[in-house]
């Protein structure tokens, strides 16, 4: 939720039911996980399942679009930061992949771009769709909030950090990005980058958008998983390098079969790095 700190307290009551995820050596204590990107639903689902497996563990999920999850871990306000890039001061554990989809209106007859063309487009060097085999329409760039990890990874991957024009429309939530691409006039003009799960869901639900091929590779789960679709970012859990049993237990759970099943509902699991 934009502009507000969303604190989701995920507590599971003790019961006589023994979860299939439960282990004999249970951990206990409070864990705070911070993030600002599209992974909120997945992290909350992991937290609920982890609490169910460890009834004496309690997880707070702090999600704020403009926050700095890495800084929250560095200052001790959180134990885990959800990001797409490593930080030299923290330990990183990858739990999945997320493709970054290039989203346009369905009526835009541009079908594919190269990685270099994406970089040129989002740095303002390509300004007309006609330069990409598309319509005679000026390109309207949709950027993401500066603090969001999807923007940081996108810029870094393309080598355009700090080069996206200030005239680009900045939008935070993925669902708002999709609605903006659909509602932009003229409809051929808008382009955005979104979490692949959001883009694929919109296409599957009949929303008037399409995802462009990049370097002649379709943006799909198998191509992200095996690395053929190279515009992807890792889902990372960053934590302090000092040993922390609760953090280690949560990361281990996230990489277990039940945890990876949760990750795979919206993202790409680690079975095919």
Image (cartoon, rainbow, N blue to C red):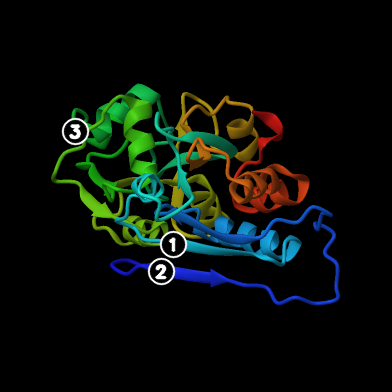
In the picture, measured across the screen, residue 166 lies left or right of residue 34, that is: left
The residue nearer to you, when weighing 123 against 239, is: 239
User: Badges 2 and 1: C-beta atoms under 8 Å apart?
Assistant: yes
Number of the front mark, 3 or 1: 1
Q: Name the image quarter holding residue 269.
A: top right
Q: CA distance from mark 2 to mark 1?
A: 6 Å
Q: Can residue 48 be seen by looking at this rendering?
A: yes
Q: Residue at x 32, y 66 (%)?
A: 2
* Quarter in which the N terminus is drawn: bottom left
Callout 1: helix, strand or loop?
Answer: strand
* Quarter in which the C terminus is drawn: top right
Q: Within 10 Å of the Cα at label 3, are there few (<14), some (14-19), or many (20+) other Cα atoms? A: some
In the rendered image, residue 239, in percent from the top left (x then y), is placed at 49, 42
Is residue 139 positioned above or below 43 on the image? above
- What numbered label is drawn on residue 62? 1
The residue nearer to you, when weighing 199 against 208, is: 199
Quick one: label 2 or label 1, which is nearer the N terminus? 2
Q: Can residue 130 be seen by looking at this rendering?
A: no
């Amino acid at each position: 939720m934009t502009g507000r700190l969303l604190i989701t307290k995920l507590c599971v009551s003790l019961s006589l039911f023994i979860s299939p995820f439960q282990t004999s050596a249970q951990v206990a204590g409070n864990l705070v996980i911070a993030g600002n990107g599209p992974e909120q639903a997945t992290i909350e689902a992991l937290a609920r399942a982890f609490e169910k497996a460890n009834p004496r563990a309690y997880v707070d999920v702090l999600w704020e679009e403009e926050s700095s999850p890495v800084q929250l871990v560095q200052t001790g306000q959180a134990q885990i930061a959800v990001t797409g890039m490593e930080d030299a001061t923290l330990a990183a554990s990858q739990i999945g992949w997320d493709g970054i989809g290039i989203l346009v209106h369905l009526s835009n007859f541009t079908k594919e771009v190269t990685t270099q063309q994406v970089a040129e487009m989002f740095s303002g060097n390509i300004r007309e769709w006609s330069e990409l085999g598309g319509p005679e329409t000026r390109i309207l760039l949709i950027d993401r909030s500066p603090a969001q990890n999807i923007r940081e990874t996108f810029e870094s991957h393309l080598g355009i950090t700090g080069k996206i024009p200030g005239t680009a429309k900045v939008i935070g939530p993925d669902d708002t990005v999709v609605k903006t691409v659909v509602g932009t006039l003229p409809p051929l003009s808008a382009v955005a980058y979104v979490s692949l799960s959001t883009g694929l869901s919109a296409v599957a639900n009949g929303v008037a958008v399409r995802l462009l091929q990049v370097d002649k590779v379709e943006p799909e789960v198998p191509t992200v998983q095996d690395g053929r679709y190279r515009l992807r970012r890792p889902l990372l859990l960053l934590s302090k390098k000092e040993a922390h049993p609760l953090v280690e237990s949560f990361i281990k759970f996230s990489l277990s079969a039940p945890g990876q099943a949760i990750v795979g509902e919206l993202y790409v699991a680690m079975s095919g790095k």
